[in-house]
Image (cartoon, rainbow, N blue to C red):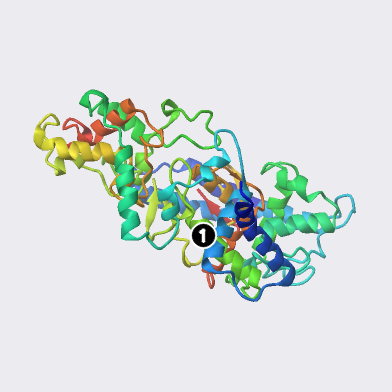
Amino acid sequence: MTHLHRIQTLAPVLLTAVCALAGCTSLPSSAELDQQAVATMKASFRDQGIATVDRLNQDLGQRACSSPVPPSDELVKRIESESMATIKWPEGGRYLGDWREGEKLAQNGRGMTWTDASATPKDNGANCYNCHQIDKKEISFGTIGPSLWNYGKLRGVKDVADPAATPIVQYTWGKLYNSKAYAACSNMPRFGHMGLLDEDQLRHVMALLLDPKSPVNQ
Amino acid sequence: MKPLWMLAAGLGALAATPAPAQKSSADAIAEYRKMLEDGNPADLFEAKGEALWKQKRGPKNASLEQCDLGKGPGVVKGAFVELPRHFADTGKVQDLEARLVTCMATLQGFNADEIAKTPFGRGEQENVTALATYVAAASRGLRFNLPQSHAEERRMYEIGKRVFYFRGGPYDFACASCHGEDGKRIRLQDLPNLNKNPGDGVGFAAWPAYRVSNGQMWGMQLRLNDCYRQQRFPYPGFGSEATIAVSTYMGVNAKGAESIAPSIKR
């Protein structure tokens, strides 16, 4: 750490101390408040189980999307293209697994909290119903994301092997793998990129959404 | 405060009434929530908190009756709807729970750091929750009106806003991911939009609350702690600056909202 860097790191802390003593009459600048907020976050959390404080180290997109004001068009493009480059397409071009397993994963909202024992994909759910309607038979669904009822059917997927279906099949894989490739500040987690689900689990969720035999497409 | 037999009757009816088959699930859930309002076990925690407030305890064998919650020593009514606020003696903006711990340290001689490190629901933390329930209940029906005259109160609002929108962790979540839009749900749970006044008795104006699903009384510190757990964040310290800043943000946004705390939740 350079001397200059150390001063920059300490600046918000010193400013807070001075304000506390003197009772500052005016607010720090917006940029100073941004720095102070990051320092506040770092000082307020501790490791607990698998949930360690390095989770607060933001990447480009997390930092850019931490405001009610969306990032500039230029930054949005950069986040989306960098996210697109992270997508790992499935081994052997096999996109679909078993929709029954996909439904189980969609129902499962567990994983990655400090009360979970492990962070390996096998111990994680896909959390889908927390935010999306999927199979209409499940009435307990969230509304943060759009309804996915008839997802494949509405997009005309009759046979996933048909080249006509390729664009929607690839888009769906990419969206599950790294949602930020298509919307820089999407609310949806990056299931592949962040190591939340493995390839087989992603295939099962793909099947739930796209397999013409899946209850979602009836 | 409702008599105990009413609590028992309310909970008993819940267990005994079968839902008719033709009723929609949403109707059944609405009815379930209505029944819960008949008897709120939070009343028991309120009574315990009142007793703790008046009881001589701790190394100094003193009560909390001289505790200054922001409206002068011993004033309980109306204090809750003006917290978090700045306190000259600590030089800090404090929420209700952090302030209660300060009073327990200064008046009763308890060790504040030890209480902050105690897990929720254990030892003196259990007492802090009961005390918070009592203090909140004394402001039931009053409207939120947090002071913003001190520069540190305004700074904490600005920090809290940034904390609210801070995205991180393996799921890329911020508070705003779930609480930044109107009319959203996780599963069947309605989510208040907390970047503005969400209305009377909603969000910040509903905690402390009794959680029926786990039979626990939760203050705002535990409410935020479990939000951060589900946000897949690391563990927020009890009374840490981020938790008090985001409470200041929610409390100021809730200006004019009627407090129904202590409330009852699923």
Image location of residue A111, percent across then percent down = 46, 34
B150 on left or right of B175: right
Query: Which SS class for mark 1?
Result: helix
Quarter residue B242 falls in:
bottom right
**Residue B210 seen by the camera:** no
Q: Residue at x 64, y 65 (%)?
A: B83
User: Hey, which quadrant is residue B133 in on the image?
Assistant: bottom right
Residue B99 screen position, x and y as percent? 72, 59
Q: Quadrant of the N terminus of chain B?
A: bottom right
The answer to whether residue A76 is above or below residue A175 is below
Regarding residue B230, the answer to whether it shows in the image is yes
The mark total stands at 1
- A9, above or below B75, in the image: above
Camera-nearest residue between B238 and B144: B238
Give percent across and percent down for residue B155.
60, 67
Q: Chain of mark 1?
A: B
> On the picture, is B191 further left or further right than A72?
right
Between B196 and B79, the one lying in front of the other is B196
Furthest residue toward top: A92
Residue at the farthest front position: A3
Counting from the top left corner in percent of width and height, residue A77 is at: 30, 53
| Left/right of residue B125 with respect to residue A137 in the rendered view | right
- Left or right? Give the position of B35 relative to A208: right
Q: Which residue is denoted by mark 1 in the rendering?
A: B162
Q: Identity of the amino acid at label 1?
A: Arg
- Estimate how packed mark 1 is, as few (under 14), some (14 to 19) or many (20 or more) residues with alpha carbons within 10 Å: many
